[in-house]
Amino acid sequence: FFFFFFFFRKRKFWSYFDHNDARLSKDIIEESFSEAHAELCSESRLLDENAYLCDIFGLKDQIIPCKDMVKEMKLDISMMEQLWEISKGLDRHVISVEKRLWTELDIETLEDGAKAQLKSVKSSHKCVRWSAAFH
């Protein structure tokens, strides 16, 4: 199970760029999330089976660290999906600002939009802040 956790942290959605320093595409990120969800679902079923066996043999405490890891991984996926939604929102904001003419720019509105984007990034859960996608 610890190997699964190790490889889980190597998934593509943890990074913003690929090995060539190109930004990851939406499809690659979505595929990475999909694979992680499927693997975590499979591992969760296996964990439930093993927890049942541990309970039968009086080893309930032995499975607790693995249950905690699965809980952490589920939170990680959820918070990383949220982080990528923040990234999409930031992209939309930048694109909308780029489309405006200089004469149409309202500095206060621009500043408010930038502050809102910064607030959403800063409000990201601490479990994603170590990731390359956050930085």
Image (cartoon, rainbow, N blue to C red):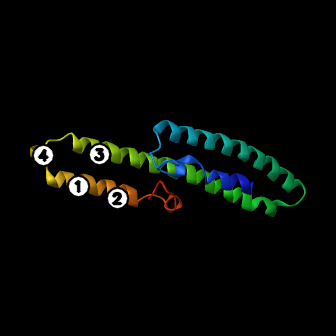
- Looking at the image, residue 85 sits to the left or right of residue 109; the answer is right
Residue at 49% from the left image edge and 57% from the top image edge = 132
> Which residue in the protein does label 4 denote?
102
Q: x, y (%) of residue 79?
A: 51, 52
Looking at numbered disc 4 in the image, what kind of residue is underneath it?
Trp
Q: Secondary structure at mark 2?
A: helix
Mark 2 / mark 4, whichever is N-terminal: 4
Q: Are marks 3 and 4 in contact (CB under 8 Å)?
A: no
Looking at numbered disc 2 in the image, what kind of residue is underneath it?
Lys
> Which residue in the protein does label 2 denote?
119
Residues under labels 1 and 4: Cα distance? Answer: 17 Å
Residue at 59% from the left image edge and 48% from the top image edge = 11
Mark 3 / mark 1, whichever is N-terminal: 3
Residues under labels 3 and 4: Cα distance? Answer: 16 Å
The mark closer to the camera, 2 or 4, is: 4
Residue at 12% from the left image edge and 46% from the top image edge = 102
> Which residue in the protein does label 1 denote?
112
Given residues 25 and 53, the one toward you in this image is: 25
Looking at numbered disc 3 in the image, what kind of residue is underneath it?
His
Q: Are marks 2 and 4 in contact (CB under 8 Å)?
A: no
> Which residue in the protein does label 3 denote?
93
Residue at 49% from the left image edge and 61% from the top image edge = 129
